[in-house]
Image (spheres, rainbow, N blue to C red):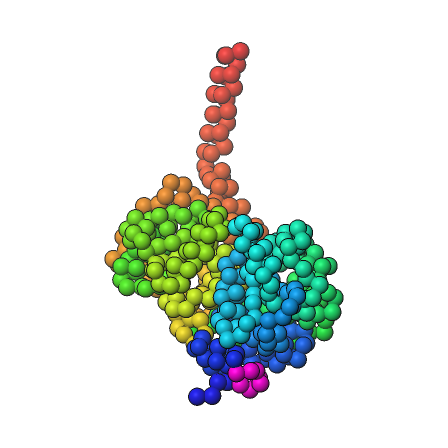
Amino acid sequence: MKNGFEAFRITRQFIDALDAMGIDTPTEIQDKAIVPALAGQDVLGIAETGSGKTLAYLLPLAAKIKYAREGHPLAVVLAPSKELAVQIHRVWCSLAANTDMRAVCLYGGVGKKTQVAALEAGCEVVITTPGRLIDLYSFGHVFLRQVRTLVLDEADRMMEMGFMPQLRSILEIIPVKRQNLLFSATFPERMEHMAGEFLDFPVRVESAEHGKPVESVIQQWVPVPNFRTKLGFLRHVLDGGWERVMVFCRTRDAAERVSKYLERRRPGSVRVLHSNKGQHSRINALDAFREGEVQVLVTTDVSSRGIDIAGVSHVVNFEIPKTIEDYLHRIGRTARINTEGTAVSLANPAEAPEILAIAEALGADVVRTELPAAVEQAPDLPGERQEIARALDMMKRKADSTYKGAFHDKQKRPGGAKKRQSRSAKGGKSKGGKR
């Protein structure tokens, strides 16, 4: 069977590598981006998560380098997180399996010795996070004067994480004459400024569905009264046969609590991943989940961007994300290229308006599904009911500028002022007596 990538006139070694990876047809963003990238043009690529952006820039990069060269790196690929850098490196190794080209993956949180040794052995491509690249450059371990291509992956995430100062520093130490490839899943207004700063007359390519959920994701939301009942829902669906599940929480604390609860009931089937974990622990958790050694990966949004794990059947938003972009990236971990998946959002009374607002903004069909009868409605955590009430109060204030709040209404109850005056008078007498 003919491989669709042959139309790009790339050499047989890459076609065979793609066949070995089980890839024979370009996605929309690959079809649009590879030709201008092969021609040496700057490219601005915008496509939804799970659309194959990584291959859209790695394939033309590998096809242009072709074989191992003497000297220093010819290309730098920048990623916002260690996990994404490791994944890009894994894709590169598969793509370059039939060549002698080398890539080195650099990231913080681990010792420099092994990474420095790999750089000294020579490579054509450096795949790295911005901070570690600048760190190694400042000590003279990496030389960038031969770089011909700069790639920025998940560029919107880099802006959100405050990497702009590091990115500008990198621009100052690599050659001015180079090809730039910038890829992003979303393109908010601030990205226009970033693109103008990093790209020279770029070819803009985008998929028709960027900024929207992948059609093959079934989206549901379940009204759940509190945190403990959400835990009960997870236990119920995992006992019911859900096989490969990613559970997203807003905070590290929530991720730890969810993972410990599941681990007590399903020993050995759960791993947790968040920014407070050591680098080796984070990579091991991802690898264990990728290889099917564990059933559930509980994580924060550190894993929502760019992480490609085949066969994720379900994504659970244990807590509703803060932004539409985070929602899109989370649910994009399932229903990867040419597959189907389900995303379920668990919403307490304060979160229900949030998921409905996300659905309305996306124009998505997020179906309400009732809590299974077998899931017992557990009591609230201490202070949880008050926290939900405050969140609802805040939403009402934002929606209606004249709304004074529930606590304001309490002060207007009949007799309220007299009681306060009475308490004040008693307090005054008591203080006076003590004097």
Q: Residue furthest left?
A: 374
Q: Is residue 35 above or below residue 114?
A: below
Residue sitting farthest toward the bottom: 1
Q: Which residues are magenta?
A: 5-12
Any magenta on residue 220? Answer: no
Residue at figure coordinates x 61%, y 67% from the top left: 124
| Residue pictured at 47% horizontal, 40% vertical | 410
Q: Main secondary structure of the magenta part?
A: helix
Above or below, 382 against 217 in this view is: above
Foreground residue, 221 or 394? 221
- In the image, 262 versus 107, the foreground residue is 107
Image quadrant for the N terminus?
Answer: bottom left
Q: Position of residue 167 (x, y in %)?
A: 66, 58
**Which of the 4 quarters of the picture holds residue 128?**
bottom right
Give x and y (percent) for residue 251: 47, 50
Q: Residue furthest right?
A: 176
Position of 370 compared to 203: left or right? left
Q: Is residue 307 visible?
A: yes
Q: Position of residue 234 (x, y in %)?
A: 33, 56
Figure disc tally? 0
| Residue at (50% x, 85% y) in the render | 4
Residue 317 in view, yes or no? no
Q: What residue lies at 44% left-to-right and 71% top-to-bottom?
A: 336
- Asked whether 9 falls inside the magenta stretch, the response is yes
Q: Nearer the viewer, residue 390 or 271?
A: 271
Q: Nearer the viewer, residue 349 or 75?
A: 75
Residue 7 sits above or below residue 249 on the image: below
In percent of width and height, residue 391 lies at 48, 49
